[in-house]
Amino acid sequence: MEDDEPMNTTEDNNKEALEAEVAPALISVHPTHHSVAVAVGSDLRVFDLREGGPVKLGAESNEVFHHKESIRAIRYGAKGKVFVSAGDDKVVKIWATDSWRCVCSVPTEKKVSAVAISDNGQFVCYADKFGTVWVVELDESIENQASVQKKGSPLLSHYCSIITSLEFSPDGQFIITADRDFKIRVTVFPKKPLNGAHEIQSYCLGHTEFVSCLAFVYSQDCPQGYLVSGSGDATVRLWDFASGLLLHTCDVGSQVGNKEANGTENNHFVVTDLCTTSDGSSVFVAVQSLPGILLLSSDFSAKTLSVIRAVSVIEEDFIPTSLGTSLTSDFLWMVMGVSNLPGFNVSSLARVRVITGSESSDNHYNVLEDKHVPCGEQLLQHLQGSLSIDKDVFSAAAEAVKTSMRNLLIKKQYSSERREFRKRGRNDKKGKR
């Protein structure tokens, strides 16, 4: 061992490796409910809801396009023709959903933390863990093109702060980025994005912890909509994003705390994901310690958010890691899961649950039994990888989810010696390429 190498290097490396391996499961739903996709670890699983069967990725070309490391972001385009996946293997994969071929691969210099697709499907944006957002322009006839490799162009940067969420505004005029340094930035999306985005419209400032997720609520009477943000400070906030004005703060931590009898610490009330209904009337909120979701109502005239009720999963310790809805159904899809669960011989675990209901039914939302989920056991078998999950494994996964999702966004504090050692390690890796 070198004299200047910290004595706890091996222990720190093992800890970092463990944190890197455990990745929360993700879910995304086709905008018109044609299919649903789940990512857990490096596995991408897609189920065709129209045909009632699993999708074989790259089936027409007989090529294998699997990710090699954990997937950190998945998303359908607004029209459903394009699907994007990206993560720790430093590759952004763009899929044509009519054939589920990978039509474009984009190599990246850093691991990817978030993706977004412009409303017209022409541009794919992705954020890396160094705080830079990149953009790729897609060909018009992407469904018919052969698989190609493209290079991203830098669009904007948050300068050394991990970007946690990436969204286009409903009208496509702005691209909104959130980071783990509490900031939300609203940038004008330029007519020629490959040349970079240089006009900042506003900043939405007010969160006191990392911003974990973004979504929009909008309606026919308010087409420009409002921005909704969730954070590690246990709040959901409503913004006039064009001006950066904070309209309302909803303390979901206190609501969840009232349901917790064991006095859980506030940092366990992290808002992990947000999802809105197509009419903008409701916001579904996943909270790190809540087995189920919180249902919020958005009042456009009063410009406020209010907690209506919690929709709980009673029979199991189901804490969602990701939420998804479509524009044409009343289903809320949820997944809980992690990859490479420590201490168990399990490559990955995913549990899918579905909530059904609507605002018109007096906020009456129900968690569906497995047999009533669309396409039933066949869907669950494919998306989960198994129909039955051992209770001990499930409980361990719930704890691993809490740890991994917070470690993903909290800044790690290192000594000066440790920082230098990490720099040397990165330079060594670059030298071997």
Image (cartoon, rainbow, N blue to C red):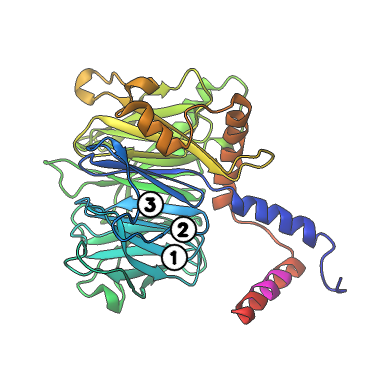
Left or right: where 405 falls relative to 396 = left
Q: Amino acid at mark 3?
A: Ile
Name, please, the residue furthest toward the bottom. 431
| Residue sitting nearer the eye, 155 or 342 | 342
Q: Is residue 368 visible?
A: no
**Residue underneath mark 3:** 74
Q: Quadrant of the C terminus?
A: bottom right
Q: Distance from label 3 to label 2 (Cα)?
A: 12 Å
Give the x, y percent position of residue 91.
Answer: 44, 65
**Residue underneath mark 1:** 91
User: Is most of the magenta stretch helix, strand or loop?
Assistant: helix
Q: Residue at x 21, y 39 (%)?
A: 327
Q: Secondary structure at mark 3?
A: strand
What range of the chain is rendered magenta?
A: 421-426
Give the x, y percent position of residue 207.
Answer: 46, 48
Give the x, y percent position of residue 359.
Answer: 23, 25
Crowd around label 3: few <14 · some 14–19 · many ≥20 (10 Å): many
Name, please, the residue furthest toward the front. 62
Q: Amino acid at mark 2?
A: His
